[in-house]
Image (cartoon, rainbow, N blue to C red):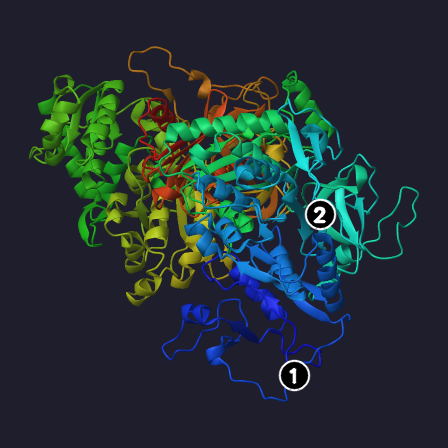
Amino acid sequence: INSQSPSTEPWGTPCFIRILFVDAGSQQIGFLLGSCGVTVALTSDACHKGLPKSATGEIPQFRGWPKLLWFVTESKHLSKPPRDWFPHIKDANSDTAYIEYKTCKDGSVLGVTVMRIALLTHCQALTQSCGYTEAETIVNVLDFKKDVGLWHGILTSVMNMMHVISVPYSLMKVNPLSWIQKVYHFKAKVACVKSRDMHWALVAHREQKDISLSSLRMLLVADGSNPWSISSCDAFLNVFQSKGLRSEVICPCASSPEALTVAIRRPVEDSSQPPGRGVLSMQGLSYSVVRVDTEERLSVLTVQDVGTVMPGALVCVVKPDGVPLLCKTDEIGELCVCSVATGTSYYGLTGMTKNTFEVFPVASGGGLVSEYAFVRTGLLGFVGPGGLVFISGKMDGLIVVSGRRHNADDIIATALAVEPMKFIYRGRIAVFSVTVLHDERIVVVAEQRPDSTEEDSFQWMSRVLQAIDSIHGVGVFCLGLVPANTLPKTPLGGLHLSETKQLYLEGGLHPCNVLMCPHTCVTNLPKPRQKQPEIGPASVMVGNLVSGKRIAMASGRDLGQTDDNDQFLFLSEVLQWRSQTTPEHILYTLLSSRGAVSSSLTCLQLHKRAERVAALLLERGGLQEGDHIALVYPPGIDLIAAFYGCLYAGCVPITVRPPHPQNISTTLPTVKMIVEVSRSACVMTTAVICKLLRSKEAVATVDIRNWPPVLDTDDLPKKKSPALYKPCNPDALAYLDFSVSTTGMLAGVQISHNAVGAFCRSVKLQCELYPSREVAICLDPYCGLGFVLWCLCSVYSGHQSILIPPVELESNPALWLLAVSQLRVRDTFCSYSVMELCTKGLGLQTEALKARGLDLSRVRACVVVAEERPRMSLTHSFSKLFKDLGLHPRSVSTAFGCRVNLAICLQVRLLCACGTSGPDPTTVYVDMRALRHDRVRLVERGSPHSLPLMESGKILPGVRIIIANPETKGPLGDSHLGEIWVHSAHNGSGYYSGNGEEVLQSDHFTSRLSFGDTSTVWARTGYLGFLRRTELTDASGERHDALYVVGALEEAMELRGMRYHPIDIETSVIRTHQSIMECAVFPWTNLLVVVVELEGSEQEALDLVPMVTKAVLEEHYLIVGVVVVTDIGVIPINSRGEKQRMHLRDGFLQDQLDPIYVAYNM
């Protein structure tokens, strides 16, 4: 009750609602009550007892609801009014009589105000149309608080002093025949039902003899405007005609909350006139035109008339969109009513009221149909012969797909026609549309019966898809089946459509079966890119010059030779020199998992241990100059000593990651493969690993008889080698760098002594390394820049390296940062996997770490070493998380290297009081759509389809870079995306082939441009990127050329004629749902396969399928072919934190992923 109504009555305007807080949409009703100023709630004793109460017995204020005074209206709670009190009866004027709530398509609740004059006129019109007389008995199965149930069962019945028998919904659930029994028992003349009630009676009917419907003169079907209610009416008549039911008794009606009763079929005594029917073409209806067809065809809709217009009302049909133009007689439009007996407004919503309740239809000539305003009913239909009104659907159920109109009720009827009783519940099926790729897509969700098998359900879904496609000529985007009684319900048991749609959009439906059909229903994808004839490299170069764009080329500063150790050509000579000049200077310190120093090496100690390793190789191994030695060590001091021992003996070392003790069957074959491919003459390792290689698990995994000799370096000879090997050729092989790429290819790169010296010198200049510096390294020391920093740079530059094995962070995630803080380290190197481990493992421990004294304010350079595009989101999360612990955001930077050149860029910003000695890494935003066409177009931050890219670091000294076309090998301009080529003294010498044959991609190290500078020898990195000259300068005044790495060429996917990078699609997928822990994509034939790891319950697995499909469609214009939902840890990731997508692809093709669910989108 609104007690603040301007009415002079003691009480104001009633608003009829149903109190059931577990139902969907109750919060929206509360918002409506608050906006109406409701302060008093009238309720029954049973309802009052069922309300939740506080400890003091008071009813709390419900979420979204205003504070209410609850008043029980049953007689035992009321006092008798005074004898002189009489109710104040007002005239039928324009004051508001009551407010009826309406739930919109989007779930919002509106209040429709009805005036007193409209209330009285409506009751009079219903009395005249239905022929109501005093003392008639009416059985009402409908909700008596709104719509037809309120108008007939409460208002008109009181006006005519009729006897009303209300059958509650709770009784109908127990006994669906209860209303028929009441009709028979009380000889009722009128019954108000829905088609659902007739269907329930048909299901429960078992040849009962004690019922008769002969007393009925009017069976009012409240949802007769629903096109498929005709089937319920026909079936009900066919069964109960033998029980006295006459065909002329069935009276469907059309109504809406705004216009009240629009039309109703009058009860007649003469049965010779059959009711009006129309057989309409579905295709014609989709174009909003009436085309009569024959019932023999499947693609037709049979509709029944809902009678004629109410007395005193004028109805017209207008265009549903835009200006309310009057439709032609053969067009479908929205019905509008001009009558006193309609709603007046949406309470408190002036704008919406004007658009709905103050409509002035316009005739074809441009003039107004009437000077009086019309009210939009929300019903779609037409006026047939004899003034009969036909309804074909509702505006709320209208779905516009590719310009054609479809009605949700029609699609439901088609779905129910496919064996409805076997698989799904009638009335528990929802059809709605979602916007995907600038058009509406149809989604069908239904509750399936518990006894349905998965195979039967998929057969039913396939038949439904075919039926909807053939009958309606439209594809279904998603068809999902959920368990019984899981969809949101309205207070009277119906399906809450808006809540169902919201659950679908949020991924909370939890379907048990889902079928996506994006290939058939998404027809507005951009056309695939057509490959044009390749333009010659010379034309490209001339075109860039003419357009004023420079050739994408950049270089680092010169190396030069300034230090004493630059005079040495070999790293082994540098170590010998340091052991003589600074024997007690500590080069390496290894930390344990608790952060304590477990071991260290001075220059002299390393030299002596290397001599003893060389003696072991020469004496026990019997090795010769140039033999290959596999070093299978855990990260530590032993690996470093063994490496230099090999150099002292003239052998070529290959560092190999040892097998994992808990996962020998998976990791040991990789060790064996590297040993075999590298043609290692022997294996050096520790006693623990030596024992592991001879264990039963190892013997069961590989054939140990093919192993080369295994040397245990825990027991080194006491004497040193008689003579150390002195290399004479700087271009000779120093070591082999073996690694597994993200595509799963194992390859070894030959690194010469000359490259080692140039590499170390370049890193020394870039990072300003010298003996008094301390550097913390938390990297795997087996390949790439991680190995160089772990083993080589300290010997060359003389700085102290604090070694922190990344594997120790699994048990102690704070180890690295605590070591950096406690040892006052200013420069540190890590990998993305280490950074991610710290971000996830320490996210909730920052306050505890601060209490333990963790201070990162001294860190001036934290460099992330990677062979991929910089992960901006991870670096930003890391910087933001540890900012409160003193970490300067500008101290976090990146490095980039690859197989052909282990370090091309390395950004170290050395913070000082006045700023930095190097420019900050720049971030640009590029158009993702242009990038797919190998074009670089810069856009503003926040622009649609923008992709943020961070530069990969400053180009190292002695390195030259050019961007080249990977097909034509011609140079490109700085507005093009191309392959990064590098020329440097520390380039690799080539891939190692143990059998001496020419390996694939041998031109990666010796490529030349096809035009321009054809004399320079370049190495092809296999990565796509672009160069951009910034306006920034460093401390030396040099212009800063920024390199942006986009992705690996061998991982890029050619789909629809465009180049896609997996990381972009994976980023979109991970953002779709909070339960997606990780994601990987790869192509399979011409299909895109998406694998997601689920963090949560398995019932959420199928929620991800439509969300993933929609996200990839909208952001990348790609249709996902297969969605695979797996447990956490299925996506293989290498030691550098990079996804092994090709390994994952092999596992998918070999059915080894053990997925939770696999969805093949049709």
Residue 300 horizontal side relative to residue 487, left or right? right
Q: Is residue 531 above or below residue 464?
A: above
Q: Which mark is residue 266?
A: 2
| Secondary structure under the numbered disc 1 in the rendered image | loop
Q: Residue drawn at (84%, 53%), measured in percent from left and top?
A: 360
Find residue 537 and report its horizontal and vertical position in percent: 63, 19
Q: Residue drawn at (47%, 80%), measured in percent from left and top?
A: 77
- Total marks drawn? 2
Q: Is residue 133 visible in this depiction of the protein? A: yes
Residue 174 horizontal side relative to residue 528, left or right? left
Q: Label 2, label 1: how many angstroms apart (C-alpha)?
A: 38 Å
Residue 174 horizontal side relative to residue 644, left or right? right
Q: Looking at the figure, which quarter contains the N terminus?
A: bottom right
Q: Look at the numbered discs 2 and 1 and tell me whether their residues touch, using CB distance below 8 Å.
A: no
Residue 290 horizontal side relative to residue 13, left or right? right
Find residue 716 and report its horizontal and vertical position in percent: 9, 34
Q: Where on the picture, by quarter, is residue 676?
A: top left
The crowd level at tag 2 (other Cα within 10 Å; few <14, some 14-19, many 20+) is: many
| Secondary structure under the numbered disc 2 in the rendered image | loop
Q: Residue drawn at (34%, 40%), measured in percent from left and top?
A: 564
Q: Earlier in the sequence, mark 2 or mark 1?
A: 1
Query: 1096 or 471: which is nearer to us?
Result: 471
Residue type (three-letter) at the residue carrying disc 1: Phe
Query: 558 or 1082: which is nearer to us?
Result: 1082
Q: Which residue is mark 1?
A: 86
Find residue 406 and report its horizontal and vertical position in percent: 65, 36
Find residue 524 and report its horizontal and vertical position in percent: 65, 30
The crowd level at tag 1 (other Cα within 10 Å; few <14, some 14-19, many 20+) is: few
Q: Which mark is residue 965?
A: none
